[in-house]
Image (cartoon, helix red, strand yellow):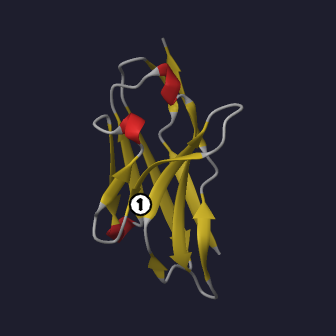
Amino acid sequence: QVQLVESGGGLVQAGGSLRLSCKASGSIFRIYSMGWHRQAPGKQRELVAEIDNFDSTNYADDVKGRFTISRDNAKNTVYLQMNSLKPDDAAVYYCKMPITGRWSTRDYWGQGTQVTVSS
């Protein structure tokens, strides 16, 4: 069984910063890319940032220059440093990892962590 557990969400004023973490645990053979998605009320879930096994990164246009994704392979953890937060960044943030476990390879999602940005 593989689990992804997120932490670090909360309430912050516009212009402030938050750091999200997502740790994978369980029967893990290999983790491929790691990513963060978000979903605001009434909107579809969207990719925020992703990082591959070679530390190549990809960001949504509206977070470039403000958010930074990083990973610690030894800890099976991905981070999202969010700076200069805007009210439009408010959403539930989910981490996602394609993982080869004991029996198969599939995408795993975290439970979500709420980010609220006050103006």
Snapshot quadrant of residue 58:
bottom left
Q: Quadrant of the N terminus?
A: bottom right
Q: Residue 54, percent across and down? A: 28, 70
The residue beneath circle 1 is 77
Q: Residue 27, percent across and down? A: 56, 80
Q: Residue 3, percent across and down? A: 60, 65
Query: Which residue is depicted at the point 41% across and 60% down?
Result: 77
Query: Which residue is depicted at the point 48% across and 59% down?
Result: 23
Query: Which residue is depicted at the point 43% across and 67% down?
Result: 33
Query: Which residue is depicted at the point 51% across and 45% down?
Result: 7
* 19 lies left or right of 27: left
Quick one: SS at disc 1? strand
Whether 101 is drawn above or below 91: the answer is below
Whether 70 is drawn above or below 16: the answer is below
Q: Nearer the viewer, residue 67 or 110?
A: 67
Give the amino acid type for the residue marked by disc 1 in the picture: Thr
**How many marks can you see?**
1
Snapshot quadrant of residue 45:
top right
* 118 lies left or right of 82: right
Snapshot quadrant of residue 100:
bottom right
